[in-house]
Amino acid sequence: MNKDVMILTGAGQIGMAIARRIGYGMKIVVGDRSIDNAKAICSTMNNAGFDTVPFEMDLSSRESILALIGEAQNYGDISMLVNAAGVSPSQASIETILRVDLYGTAVLLEEVGKVIKSGGAGVTISSQSGHRMPALAPEQDRLLATTPAEELLSLDMLRPDNIRDTLHAYQMAKRCNVKRVMAEAVKWGERGARINSISPGIIVTPLAIDEFNGPRGDFYKNMFAKCPAGRPGTADEVANVAELLMRPQGAFITGADFLIDGGATASYFYGPLNPDAK
Ligand SMILES: NC(=O)c1ccc[n+]([C@@H]2O[C@H](COP(=O)([O-])OP(=O)(O)OC[C@H]3O[C@@H](n4cnc5c(N)ncnc54)[C@H](O)[C@@H]3O)[C@@H](O)[C@H]2O)c1
């Protein structure tokens, strides 16, 4: 029997929380560069009554993304996309961050957008990090939104000598995610489908724990201690937002980005997290 299919990229805590919240009754194809991560999530979910299958793939490769989509189509029509694959500033080089988080996300949204079922919905995980970077010029935003994916990494602003460090690369990637979602929402809309992004603050996952233990560890710990919520978030709280965006209640929401950060960005601009605050 054919089922509606969800593609989940990134077998991490955020991806699993979203898939558990909305993926019941569907076939869920779990793509990850680490097949062990994909198998672990699939085992947890299958033991809880879900129908998942692991698939080894690399978000930074169009060929690999197409293979994942092909695998998903073996089971039925693709009606949901959850993109929660990514690398953080403490985990990877500038080149890898741009290739995975920026280019890979752009290709995934483009390719799934060509086959998504009418009525379908997608969500990609961006980051609060993109929100605290100063605004780019309108022309730079337009280039991030609309440059063909294969030419993105040749843009002047993304050339390695114009990227200060891995945090800057991550911020540019996440800013680009939000812009691509806006441009893709127009195309997904032509198929009767919707695409949005979520920008989480600090959510306790292996990726965040790598950040706590990395060179910016104190910065991150201070961030959640001084944000209005006074704590880091959980993957299940991100799933609360994803559920609204993916379900019919969110039918009027597309091409949008949702910040869920316990108020850390607000405090960064206008509160005790402001770098210039006394
Ligand atoms: N945890 C946080 O605090 C936080 C905050 C903001 C944004 N995010 C974003 O959320 C997303 C998910 O992060 P998480 O915290 O659940 O992390 P996680 O480490 O639990 O999961 C990320 C998964 O992505 C996979 N992955 C990495 N590179 C890949 C590639 N090239 N191809 C396929 N899979 C790849 C990893 O193997 C891992 O299983 C990321 O995009 C991250 O930037 C996380």
Image: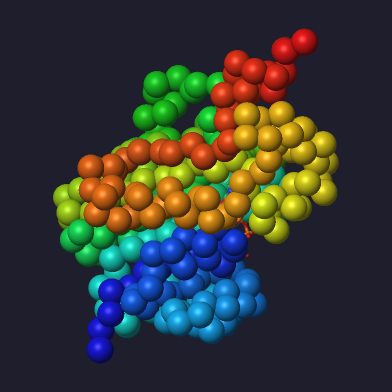
Way the structure is coloured = rainbow
Image quadrant where one finds the N terminus: bottom left
Task: Tell me residue 54's x, y (percent).
Answer: 51, 79
Q: Nearer the viewer, residue 242 or 11?
A: 242
**What residue occupies the far bottom of the structure in this picture?**
1
Q: Nearer the viewer, residue 184 or 10?
A: 10
The tally of labels here is 0
Q: Nearer the viewer, residue 17 or 178?
A: 17
| Residue drawn 76% across the image and 52% down it | 210
**Is there any visible trace of residue 65 in the rendered image?**
no
Image quadrant where one finds the C terminus: top right
Task: Tell me residue 6's x, y (percent).
Answer: 37, 69
Q: Is residue 129 left or right of residue 52?
A: right
Q: Is residue 189 left or right of residue 63?
A: left
**Is there any visible trace of residue 11 in the rendered image?**
yes
Asked if 20 appears above or below 219 in the picture, the reply is: below
Q: Quadrant of residue 4?
A: bottom left
Task: Tell me residue 32's x, y (percent).
Answer: 55, 69
Asked if 173 appears above or below 53 in the picture, the reply is: above
Q: Quadrant of residue 56?
A: bottom right
| Residue drawn 29% across the image and 69% down it | 78
Q: Quadrant of residue 38?
A: bottom right
| Residue drawn 36% across the image and 46% down it | 196
Asked if 217 appears above or below 120 in the picture, the reply is: above
Task: Tell me residue 51's x, y (percent).
Answer: 42, 81
Quadrant containing ligand 1? bottom right
| Residue drawn 75% across the image and 47% down it | 211
Q: Is residue 19 left or right of residue 33?
A: left
